[in-house]
Amino acid sequence: MPYDPKTIEPRWQRYWEENQTFRTEDGQSRPKYYVLDMFPYPSGDGLHVGHPEGYTATDVVARYKRMMGFNVLHPMGWDAYGLPAERYAVRTGVHPAITTRSNISNFRQQVRRLGFSYDWSREISTTDPEFVRWTQWIFLQMYKAGLAYQADVAVNWCPAQGTVLANEEVKDGRYVETGDPVERRTMRQWMLKITAYADRLLADLDELDWPEGIKAMQRNWIGRSEGAEVTFTVEDRESSLTVYTTRPETIFGATFVVLAPEHPAIDAIASVGQREEVDAYRTRAAAMSAIEKSQAQSKSGVFTGAYAINPANGSRIPVWVADYVLMSYGTGTIMAVPAHDDRDRDFAEEFGLPIVEVVSASGFPSGEVPPAAWTGEGSMINSGFLDGMETKTARTEAISWMTEQGVGVERIEYKLRDWLFSRQRYWGEPFPILHAADGSIVPLPEDALPLLPPELDEYRPTPDGEPPLARAGDWVRTVDPKSGMEALRETNTMPQWAGSCWYYLRFADPRNVTAPIDPEKEKYWLPVDLYVGGAEHAVLHLLYARFWHKVLFDIGVVTSKEPFRKLFNQGMILAYSYKDAAGRYYRPEDAAERDGRWHVGEIEVERQVEKMSKSKFNVVNPDEVVEQYGADAMRLYELFMGPLDVAKPWQMSGVAGVSRFLHRVWRIAVGEDGMLSSKITDAEPSPEIARILHKTIKSVGDDIEALRFNTAISKLMELSNALTGLDTRPRSTVESFVLLLAPFAPHIAEELWKLLGHPKSLSHDPWPTYDPALADDDIREIIVQVNGKLRGRVHAASMISDVELVALAARDAEVEAKLVGKTVLKEIVVPGRLVNFVVAD
Ligand code: ANZ
């Protein structure tokens, strides 16, 4: 009877479900292990082969840890609010509530077919009313703590999406998800004070077992700089200007001051003669899109006609306006030091402004200005009381001097800005907020939660930024339950990130109706031990969730400082695509290789590895893979393709390859008649097989712990080859092999386990253990001679001492028989090879 995943797999999936094999109980005395996938948003396109890559990895870990005796929490849920779900609804014209429900059930069914050991009793969706209740509750706590506030802010308005976006969602003037351009506007929005946590978000990164690249991206995004604020008086004006600098020691080299074009002080400073030119420049700068700004190379700017006084040396320096200075950073004003800053240098050269060197560039003749800005450290020159000091010392000295003189103070600045938390979209959590007639903000009482989005037929975004919820007049007009006065509901909604900021907590206590999570359960389950998902969340979700977690820590909801102890990013799964010289794509199944070149019919095409996309016809549908090869083959291939964290192309031939492996595995234990193979015996394994087995147990365990799944699988393949080669296969070895295979290919493993005579699922059976001496890679076979004649063979680690080796050799049964009653005259040892006992006859 051949291996038939089509009958085996659904049967075991039903068994697991009926027996609640993966149901997790709380608070046991056993140690816990919480392994989590970044939950998907259930898009209308269904599952992509990229999803199960991470899901299979975490499932292997979950199954392995269970067999290691851990109480494992391994849940799945749906990130169902937000732009992606709504974009799909807008495209199809079907209400998001309906599409979301059907998308979820489609995703669930697709995920289930892969046999993951999720505890489905803990399934949650961010759109569940009970989940929404606690998302809104957390927002209310933030509001009460002063961490949520409304403000008129310069926002990223995306006309194509009809909503504002957070800074984290915009790169080079475009929405990162869609590439739609973004404009600057000022709008009244809800903000979350993530900046209040900047220091902790930065410091606590050090404790995390996360990829260094992701930590570096978060550090850069938070962008802490140590520097000083320095005040420059303006000649003949009432006003003064405060600059932010990270190089206060270079103040003697400050030869001009520059303001951002949006700076409010410009009106008071610009001279009558320069006013017109300044205004024209400011208008031009305002009209520039964020995209143009991010691409602007050449320096542009305008002189204000005013002069500032450098407080260090009293020199009179011109004040300029230029768009390379950002209003949103520091004070929106800089002291320009063209000898030691590249941008200042370009600007000075463009407009013929003086360049004064104050840090000697090592090796450059003094008195001459080097051809480019020297931005490194050095010793101070042309700097009065700072002369001769090293830059680092001079920095501290300069700040002390400024503080004494009352012209400056030390200041720490962050690039991180508060999180713009409202969206002008329909499909999100409404804010639990009322606006009273007198303009005051009234938070909804907690017992009025959840507040769900109102029923609306027209939920499309509006062109002017008026939220779609404003159309639900009867919902918007309400009564403040406390005062009984008329009030209007807030019509903005929360962004798609809200639910994912705390969903990992809820899995530990998904049905709690009195709190977001029970404190005992939180203490037991949190933090997440292993979190796996794509690297695209490096800053967005992973920074937002850390922020909420810290807020929840401060209000006593959680006891851990960080939510995710270990993070691992899966690599992108790519695919081959085929296109001709004109850039037209062809279906992969129509392409064939001839003489080393690819063709579709007579047309020559180029084969490339690219992202999967419908327009390139190279999307692989997981359902078809399961249909053809089964879930176990799909799972194995997902992990056998290469290291988990690298990008790699999908190849159907690879799936066929692992499928052949599973067929061979089947034949190790199953005879022609479908019964246990007659080759399986109760004999002891040979030393050779025992060694291979123990080595495999050790390395597969080590590989799973280190998330090196591809090498674990190849070691299982080696062991299976060894077993296939045997005429009699020791039952104990075959059983151990089945247990080792189980986390990777659980369906076939359960089936073989049953055939081997075990009536119950192996999911909670102990993981095989190994004998370290046998598992040692460097075990050598040692020949044992007595008077030069071969009498036995022993196995020993290459590191063993001569004395130990002799003792081991003497214990070999045959050798021992030859030695009894004899006098050993001499022992000759050739380490790693041979022991010869020379005995008297
Ligand atoms: C004088 C100076 C001398 C500077 C020098 C640099 C080198 P980070 O490290 O990124 O914090 N700066 C300050 N505010 C700015 C703004 N709103 N827009 C553009 N540039 C701004 O950078 C801090 C440095 O960037 C500050 O230190 C300032 O230039 C500039 F040899 O001041 B520096």
Image (tube, rainbow, N blue to C red):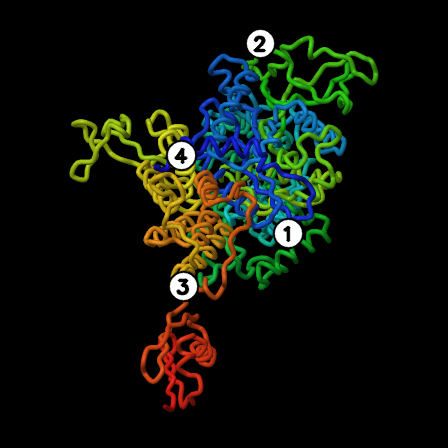
Upstream in sequence: badge 4 or badge 2: 4
Q: Secondary structure at mark 4?
A: helix
Looking at the rendered structure, the secondary structure element under dot 2 is loop
Can residue 305 be seen?
A: no
Q: Is residue 773 above or below residue 714?
A: below
Secondary structure of the residue carrying numbered label 1: loop
Residue at position x 52%, y 27% in the image: 108
On the image, the x and y values in percent for residue 579 come to 26, 30
**Three-letter amino acid code at the position of disc 1:** Ala
Location of residue 418 in the rendering, given as x and y in whole percent from the top left corner: 64, 34
* Above or below, comparing residue 33 to residue 687 in the picture: above
Measure how far apart labels 1 and 3 are at the Cα level.
83 Å
For discs 1 and 3, the disc positioned in front in the rendered view: 3
Asked if marks 4 and 2 touch (Cβ < 8 Å), the reply is no
**Of pointers 1 and 2, the one earlier in the residue sequence:** 1
- First in sequence: mark 1 or mark 4? 4
| Mark 1 CB near ligand 1 (8 Å cut) | no
Cα distance in 3D space between marks 1 and 2: 66 Å
Residue in view at x 44 percent, y 61 percent: 364
Residue 504: image tag: none
